[in-house]
Image: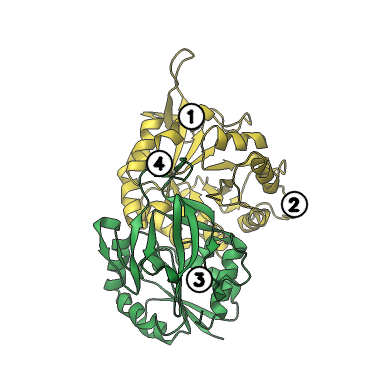
Amino acid sequence: MQRIAVIDYGMGNLRSVSKAIEHVAPDDEVVVTHDAATIESADRIVCPGQGAALDCMQALQASGMAEVVSRTVATRPFLGICMGFQVLLSRSDENGGVSCLDIISGRVVRFADPLHDTDGTRLKVPHMGWSEVTHSQPHPLWSGIDNGSRFYFAHSYYCVPDESQRVTGTCHYGHDIAVSVAHNNVFACQFHPEKSAADGLQLLKNFTQWNGES
Amino acid sequence: MGLAKRIIPCLDVDAGRVVKGVKFLEIRDAGDPVNVARGYNEAGADEITFLDITASSDNRDTILHVVEEVASQVFIPLTVGGGIREVADVRRLLNAGADKVGINTAAVKRPELVREATDKVGSQCIVVALDAKSVSGPDEPPRWEIFTHGGRQGTGIDAIEWAVKMAEYGAGELLLTSMDRDGTKIGFDLALTRAITDAVEIPVIASGGVGNLQHLSDGVLKGGADAVLAASIFHFGEYTIAEAKAHMASQSIEVRC
């Protein structure tokens, strides 16, 4: 049995994430926690998150979780989801500009307004719903998931990592955007695996079995 | 290969049970929200909406238990509407496991609630539900007004202006119901749907009036909707979600298989 810590910094719905992991790893212990010692003793760490970048960064800092994430992120399998992906980058344009954790070099930017697809059709923002995710490189977390499977998205800002070789998944929304990255033992995604039905559960299951290597 | 148009079954929940009966395959207890949600998930629904129609305030917290139960077993997006009065109500539902919360009457009473809620939890969690009714005469240009209290109470607010305002206030999505069509099975009010989808940048869910599969396609192709919501055609087993998707796909609408 291993322990999987879901970081609670007071933002958003953690229940969906923790319940989905419990569902795919019934023998593991899943703890939702803001206790640094518990996180540091966990075998795997999940950083979810919703809401606005400024609130999230402030909550991470106020709770001491920013430091804990920065310290633990390199030491064991780490999964960032949605805002938990965005905060790993250097900075976000949201809320007038927010410095983030700078674990993955890059920037979080807003979709253009108005946003148009390559054929000229207007696209809505937020990008809300199920989009096809293309595996831009193989990764253990894609195991058992068809290239091009749809995942659930709900976001107005997206990540632009500086190093394109880190990108593991893209989707097309007006243009190609990076929707997942891998960086050593970190895998982070813009979509919500916990809300993406069977393929999302498969990704979470893969995470619970991943040794942290690419 | 863009974004799939969503099909969303909508369920009325009263005192913790799904009401109006649901009759699709292999669901033994139609009143159990978890079973119903699980059935729709397996059938390929893209999202599920629960409307809490509980009248008594004693039973208000029941919906939280329903959401907790469903969210721990069904892993697709869940929207919950009904009875939201303040930001604390939104937070409670999200913490219980809802992904999005629908706000209707409370937004009409106090539009700032939408701004406060989106500031706290993000636009992607806030769906503003618009109940609109045609108020123009036969020879007048079409005009729709926002109604509250299940369509009984007029507000004098123009539906299109309201949609634009709610988007400006941060709503992440609009759930547009035609009160003229609701329950009629003669199809969406496509002129209304088109007027709203043209007016805002945020996604719009069309609702009210679906009686057959072509109505769903029309909502997307003619109304410009990003998602279509229906209740009775799915609950009573007239059509399956898969049939709805196959029909939409046959008209070149992108759907999630």
Depth order, front residue of A87/B56: A87
Q: Nearer the viewer, residue B232 or B20?
A: B232
Between marks 4 and 2, how big is the CA–CA gap? 38 Å
Mark 4 = which residue?
B201
Q: Is residue A181 left or right of residue B116?
A: right
Camera-nearest label, 4 or 1: 4
**Circle 2 or circle 1, nearest the eye:** 1
Image quarter of residue B141: top left
Residue type highlighted by circle 1: Leu
Give the crowd class for mark 4: few <14, some 14-19, many >=20 residues within 10 Å: many
Residue most extreme to the top: B139
- Residue linked to disc 3: A18
| Amino acid of disc 3 | Ser
Mark 1 belongs to which subunit? B
> Residue flagged by tag 2: what amino acid is it?
Leu
Give the color of chain A as drawn: green
- Nearer to us of marks 3 and 4 is 4
What numbered label is drawn on residue B192?
1
Residue at 27% x, 56% y is: A95
Q: CA distance from mark 3 to mark 1?
A: 40 Å
Give how far apart the Cα atoms at labels 2 and 3 are.
Answer: 30 Å
Q: Tag 1 or tag 2, which sits nearer the N-term?
A: 2
Q: Report the chain shown in yellow.
A: B
Labels 3 and 4 touching (C-beta < 8 A): no
**Which kind of residue does numbered mark 4 sit on?**
Glu
Secondary structure type for disc 2 = loop
Does residue B27 appear to the left or right of A102 in the view shown?
A: right
Q: Which residue was labeled with disc 2? A: B25
Q: How is the image coloured?
A: by chain
Q: Secondary structure at mark 3?
A: helix
